[in-house]
Image: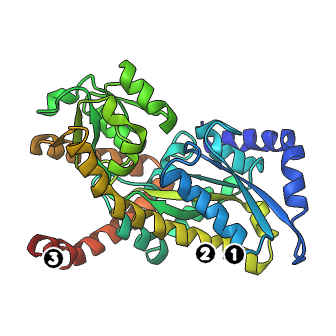
Amino acid sequence: MKRRDFIKQASVGAVVSSAAAAPAIATTTKSADTKIKWKMVTTWPKNFPVLGTGANQLAELITEMSDGRIEVKVYGAGELIPAFEVFDAVSRGTAQIGHGSAYYWKGKIEEAQFFSTVPFGMNSQEMTSWLYYGGGMELWKETYEPFGVIPAAAGNTTVQMAGWFNKEINNVNDLKGLKMRIPGLGGEVLKRAGGTPVNLPGGELFTSLKTGAIDATEWVGPYNDLAFGLYKAAKYYYYPGWHEPGTTLEAIINKEAFEVLPGDLKSIVENACKIVNQNMSLEFTAKNNTALDTLVNKHNVDVRRLPDDVLNKLKELSHDVVSELAEKNKAAQKIYDSYNKFYKQVSAWHEISEKIYYNVR
């Protein structure tokens, strides 16, 4: 759907949903005694470790830091709306805040995927640096502006695993015909390699993999994947997560609801997002290896590295996919130029800092 068509449709939806949205926005005044009630809708299963609980923490922080002046109630995927309708709901004002990741909206805003993750691109530390010190955040806000939505970084998965497979991947040909749940730019790369990408919400992964509806799935990493029980549905667990080297999760905020807040509450919302953005990556770092140890030593999971020829081919295709997106879309080109410039700079530094240190320590 083209952007102008989406905006037109969203405008119609705003009229229809105004009865639901208006009370929460109308009661938002500058009075310190006013109790503001916000709904948060998420793309994650309710209370799911790190992703769902990260959204819960964001809601709790906003409520606590504001001393209850903003009260945020969280709805997991499917409770109030389906997982992939979060952006629409926040844009319309049906909910005042949402939690998900930008690549889920690629059907509406193709260039938004750069704010989530780029295959073989920047890691979590680099992504956050680009957003806050490389001009990324300004471009992100500009991208969402026509939809009445304000974005904020609110979590990062760090480097993911390549995923769970019910067939061995020994060479590039093994990707042909592979039906795999994989979103965003990574999905397009798999398609170029001859596979079939499928975009499913997290709550449907286990059943789809177990029943054979899909041959493989990526999710996040050991800690989340263990919680989902994916080891019960697939034989092989491959690494590295070439497709999602540092996926930014986002809070999206209805612009009208945000702009009527007094300055201190705006600051609380913004800084609560920054806290969760840091905490989530720290939690994954702390818990992933313990979970991996459990998967290997308790559940006998077969952990394998993707062959070099497969990774090299995927990297080549990734470059093509990203470059072609930039070439056909002026907004994407602007974002890609900024991303790529920062990527080159930070990579040069990390070659003699992070990378060399990992190699020698």
Question: What is the x, y in percent for residue 228?
Answer: 42, 39
- Mark identifier at residue 357: 3
Amino acid carrying mark 3 in the image:
Tyr
Q: Are marks 2 and 1 in contact (CB under 8 Å)?
A: yes
N-term mark: 3 or 2: 2
The secondary element bearing badge 1 is classed as helix
Q: Residues within 10 Å of mark 3 (few under 14, many from 20)?
A: few
Q: Could you say where residue 187 lies in the image, as x and y percent from the top left?
A: 37, 38
Position of residue 18 relative to residue 231, above or below, is below
Q: Residue flagged by tag 2: what amino acid is it?
A: Asn
Residue 271 disc label = 2
Residue type for callout 1:
Met
Residue tagged 1: 65
Label 2, label 1: how many angstroms apart (C-alpha)?
10 Å
Residue 266: image quadrant is: bottom right
Q: Nearer the viewer, residue 43 or 114?
A: 43
Q: Is residue 185 visible?
A: no
Residue 66 versus residue 143 in the image, above or below: below
Taking the spot 61% from the left edge, 40% from the top edge, the residue there is 77
Residue 51 percent location from the top left of the image: 50, 52
Say which quadrant the C terminus sits in.
bottom left
